[in-house]
Image (cartoon, grey):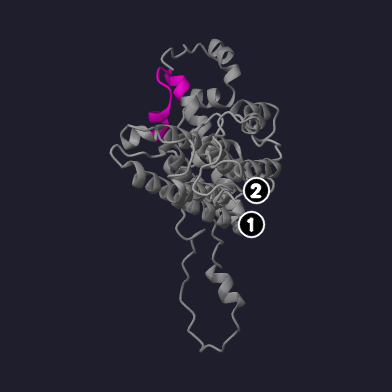
């Protein structure tokens, strides 16, 4: 439909910039703005918005018969993204790329005459850059839209999924400047909690709904390929010096894919213990063996000490607990508690009191005669 020739051959049809139908379509999308989505979150909902995306696509299809306008097609790509997620985004980006490949000479906004190639196409470039609009474009929609819905766990948005691939150093580099040490620590803690929640959801879904994760992975790969095609199609027509890229959208998609591919997001079923496998095996006659003179006491568990002798061994055991639950019961909250316990292992008494009951520390210090450490 969007790539078909118009009624008038070799023509771009109407310039839709000031067409009342196009302006009405843009106003309808105000309900999916960043402000509207943030309002949903403030109410305790997800960042999804209840627009009739299928109806909006029908409106865009009807409008496309009047004129082939890149500004309209960017809106179409956004509608497709909201209708079908990453797969819809791939379809929308492919539509934009094929439009440039097929209809460059018959497309609005029109090229400006008497200028260099890139300057002549500046309005088209600006129209395409709207896909990276974080307030009212595909980039913002990806950030807020739900992409995974694990049973019994909070929904995961595209922004959540991308955050799972952000390391501590990247978080600090991309954060606001001028934050105090306490503010930086709080920001890092909130990010860690978000990433842990996302990775837990990924593991749970790989166990219960692996096809949903696989579908998202396929869609993200297709979207990245379509974005590369769009960049190549544009470079073939305006040159690549300087290159015209869409780095913010690419970074979002790559981070979403990286989180899904990370080892922490995988689910693996435990292998059958050797003792159990031997018990389940059919009995076979064995030759008698002489009884040993003495049998050494077996350790409590292979690789583990019978008794903990240091804080380091305590931390190691907590790591094993975390690993067990993340592999076998990914929806369990116990790994979060174990991580908090591990953080407290090296603390002294006062630090533990402050961690567990910060509200009572002032009274305790007064009674105990302990001066407060102003450097904390």
Q: How many marks?
A: 2
Residue 48's image quarter? top right
Circle 1 crowding by C-alpha within 10 Å: few under 14, some 14–19, many from 20: some
Q: Quadrant of the C terminus?
A: top left
Q: Is residue 322 magenta?
A: no
Q: Residue at x 48, y 53 (%)?
A: 221
Q: Which residue is mark 1?
A: 209
Which residue position holds label 2? 150
What percent of the width, then of the height, locates residue 282? 60, 83
Of the pair 248 and 298, the residue shown nearer to us: 248
**Tag 1's secondary structure?**
loop
Q: Is residue 156 above or below residue 21?
A: below
Q: Which residues are magenta?
A: 168-184
The answer to whether residue 307 of the structure is visible from this angle is no
Out of 48 and 80, give the one closest to the viewer.
Answer: 80
Q: Nearer the viewer, residue 47 or 167?
A: 47
């Amino acid at each position: 439909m969007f790539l078909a020739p118009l009624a008038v051959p070799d023509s771009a049809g109407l310039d839709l910039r000031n067409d009342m139908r196009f302006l009405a379509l843009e106003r309808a999308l105000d309900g999916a703005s960043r402000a509207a989505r943030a309002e949903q979150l403030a109410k305790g909902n997800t960042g999804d918005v209840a627009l009739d995306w299928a109806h909006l696509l029908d409106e865009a299809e009807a409008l496309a018969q009047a004129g082939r306008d890149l500004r309209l097609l960017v809106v179409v790509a956004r509608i497709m993204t909201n209708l079908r997620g990453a797969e819809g985004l791939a379809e929308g980006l492919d539509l934009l790329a094929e439009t440039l490949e097929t209809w460059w000479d018959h497309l609005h906004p029109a090229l400006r005459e008497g200028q260099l190639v890139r300057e002549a196409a500046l309005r088209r470039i600006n129209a395409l850059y709207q896909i990276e609009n974080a307030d009212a474009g595909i980039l913002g929609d990806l950030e807020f839209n739900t992409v995974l819905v694990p049973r019994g766990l909070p929904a995961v948005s595209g922004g959540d999924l991308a955050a799972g691939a952000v390391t501590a150093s990247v978080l600090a580099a991309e954060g606001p400047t001028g934050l105090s040490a306490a503010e930086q620590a709080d920001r890092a803690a909130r990010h860690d909690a978000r990433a842990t929640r996302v990775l837990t959801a990924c593991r749970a879904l790989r166990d219960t709904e692996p096809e949903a994760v696989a579908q998202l992975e396929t869609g993200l790969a297709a979207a990245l390929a379509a974005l590369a095609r769009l960049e190549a199609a544009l470079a073939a027509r305006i040159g690549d010096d300087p290159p015209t890229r869409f780095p913010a959208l690419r970074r979002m998609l790559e981070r979403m894919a990286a989180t899904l591919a990370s080892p922490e997001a995988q689910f693996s079923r435990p292998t059958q213990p050797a003792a159990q496998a031997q018990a389940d095996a059919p009995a076979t006659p064995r030759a008698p063996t002489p009884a040993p003179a003495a049998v050494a006491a077996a350790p409590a568990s292979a690789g583990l000490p019978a008794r903990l002798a240091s804080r380091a061994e305590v931390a190691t055991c907590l790591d094993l607990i975390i690993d067990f639950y993340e592999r076998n019961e990914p929806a369990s909250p116990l790994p979060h508690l174990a991580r908090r316990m591990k953080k407290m292992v090296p603390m002294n008494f006062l630090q533990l009191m402050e961690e567990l009951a910060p509200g009572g520390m002032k009274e305790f210090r007064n009674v105990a005669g302990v001066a407060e450490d102003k450097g904390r």
